[in-house]
Image (cartoon, grey):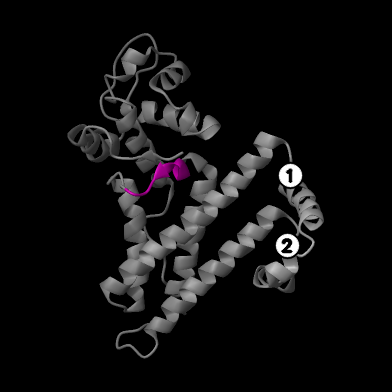
Amino acid sequence: MSIIAGQGDAARSLALLWGEAEAGGGRTAPGPKPALSVAAVVAAAVEVADEGGVTALSMRAVADRLGRSSMALYTYVPGKAELVDLMYDRAHAELPGAYSLEDGWRAAATAWAADLRALYLRHPWLLQVSYARPVLGPCEQRVMEALAGVLFATGLPAYTLRAAAASLFDLVRGGARTRAEARLAAAATGVADTEWWAERAARLGEVAPDFAERFPLSVRLSAGEAEGGAPASWEERMDATHAAGLALLLDGLEAATEGRPGGVSPR
């Protein structure tokens, strides 16, 4: 289930994203316990989400982790909606703000995709926050700025690169979601993916012995994985699929640069 970002008070959310939180945590409160701050509240919320996903996130859960009352948190963050925006943005602060073009734009784009995918897998709850409405925070925007710096090095026009950027985000996010959900499925059911697929394949062969005749092209696609020397583990297969899909997308972008004035070699 996805959470739609940007549902809180726009003025308060944006002020926190670009003001207090960006400056290093905002106001603090004295007392016998360690002082609270916006940054401390957000960090605790990220820990809660890392452990239990966004379904486990609540102001009470964050307050309990900080050893405070829920009411104490409202001094710093208006509510859960604004907190989700802050969490989402601050998680993206882990990513670089720029990529070297020394080895060409393609190598830089591959590094950007790898870093973003790793972020999603470190914090899989990010994938539960819908990208339909961005939080419009500085850290999230740095990620886009870094990608734009790579893509504009191709020499292609902005309207083409906008589509390329959207496709890259969708590819990385979609692949990371599948991989994260596969981990979740194995943990929740106690059944490994390889075991699940082996049992279902055997059962399918019993109930649909004519499967290959009815769906020959699907079988042909599956055979293509074996032809490519597919890795043994399910997660390794998903990693390989991501790498192949990214390569195809970058191949298309590279082809678009050929013969265009200003087009730049990927290497």
The residue at the point 49 percent across, 66 percent down is 110
The residue at the point 73 percent across, 74 percent down is 227
**Mark sitting on residue 155:** none
The residue at the point 60 percent across, 64 percent down is 241
Is residue 44 in the magenta section?
no
In front of the other: 245 or 105? 245
Element class at badge 1: loop
| Residue 141 pos. (x, y %) | 31, 52
| Residue 77 pos. (x, y %) | 29, 26
User: In this orientation, does residue 123 appear?
Assistant: no
Disc 2 residue crowd, few under 14, some 14–19, many 20+, Cα 10 Å? some
| Residue 21 pos. (x, y %) | 29, 35
User: In this orientation, does residue 151 appear?
Assistant: yes
Q: Locate residue 217: give its quadrant.
A: bottom right
In front of the other: 17 or 191? 191
Is 60 drawn above or below residue 4 in the view shown?
Answer: above
Q: Going by the picture, which residue comes out furthest to the top?
A: 32
Tell whether 87 sits left or right of 244: left
- The residue carrying mark 1 is 192
- The residue carrying mark 2 is 231
N-terminal of the pair, mark 2 or mark 1, is: 1
Using the numbered discs, state the Cα–Cα distance from disc 2 to disc 1 in whole angstroms: 16 Å
Of marks 2 and 1, the one in the foreground: 1
Is 136 drawn above or below residue 33 in the view shown?
Answer: below
In front of the other: 260 or 139? 260
The residue at the point 70 percent across, 54 percent down is 234
Is residue 130 in the magenta section?
yes
Please state the extent of the stretch shown in magenta in the rendering: 126-132
| Residue 81 pos. (x, y %) | 32, 31
Q: Locate residue 147: give its quadrant.
A: bottom left
Disc 1 residue crowd, few under 14, some 14–19, many 20+, Cα 10 Å? some
Q: Going by the picture, which residue comes out furthest to the bottom?
A: 259
